[in-house]
């Protein structure tokens, strides 16, 4: 089952999350292993003939929002993602996120040339 939700606070972003049906009515759904974000505003070309790159602060906001809203992690602080990450399918990079006062790694995997990326749970 796919869930489509607007991420209005991040501009033109929509969220695609893979969920599972709850085995027992009334019990919460398990958190997905990864969440995929589609972004039209976080990727910008550096020049017409050059590759497109993600805008780090927009990805940082997206990662924090996904961890809070989709993974239901309540003690999330700031995220730091590297600048200049290519918008190329299959590319991965690591963002560092403050979780309860400890730095955790969050893997981000680029899924499409349109700026869709997947956010793993903190490790």
Image: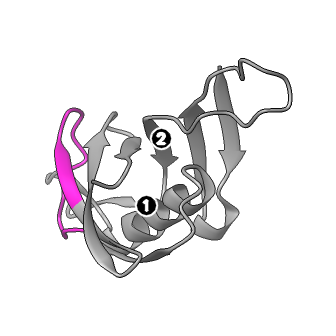
Residue 86 image offset from top left, x and y in percent: 18, 51
Residue 13 seen in the current view: yes
Taking the magenta stretch, the answer to whether it contains residue 116 is no
Q: Residue at x 32, y 67 (%)?
A: 55
Task: Quarter of the image for the N terminus: give it.
Answer: top right
Is 101 situated above or below 105? below
Segment tinted magenta in the rendering = 81-94
- Say what secondary structure mark 1 lies in: helix
Q: Which of disc 2 and disc 1 is earlier in sequence? A: 2
- Near-viewer residue (116 or 47): 116
- Near-viewer residue (49 or 64): 64
Tell me the quarter of the picture where residue 22 sits.
top right
Q: In the rendered image, which residue does mark 2 sit on?
A: 35
Q: Residue placed farthest to the right in the image?
A: 26
Distance from Cα at disc 1 to Cα at disc 2? 10 Å
Taking the magenta stretch, the answer to whether it contains residue 85 is yes
Q: In the rendered image, which residue does mark 1 sit on?
A: 63
- Near-viewer residue (108 or 28): 28
Left or right of 73 on screen, residue 119: left
- Near-viewer residue (15 or 102): 102
């Amino acid at each position: 089952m796919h869930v489509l939700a607007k991420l209005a606070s991040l501009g033109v972003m929509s969220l695609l999350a893979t969920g599972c049906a709850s085995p027992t009515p009334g019990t919460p759904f398990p958190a997905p292993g990864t969440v995929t974000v589609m972004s039209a505003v976080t990727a910008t070309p550096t020049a017409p003939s050059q590759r497109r790159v993600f805008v780090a602060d927009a990805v940082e906001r997206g990662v924090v929002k996904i961890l809070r809203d989709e993974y239901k992690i309540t003690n999330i602080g700031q995220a730091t993602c590297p600048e200049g990450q290519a918008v190329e399918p299959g590319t991965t990079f690591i963002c560092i996120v403050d979780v309860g006062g400890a730095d955790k790694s969050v893997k981000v995997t680029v899924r499409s040339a349109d700026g869709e990326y997947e956010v793993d749970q903190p490790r």
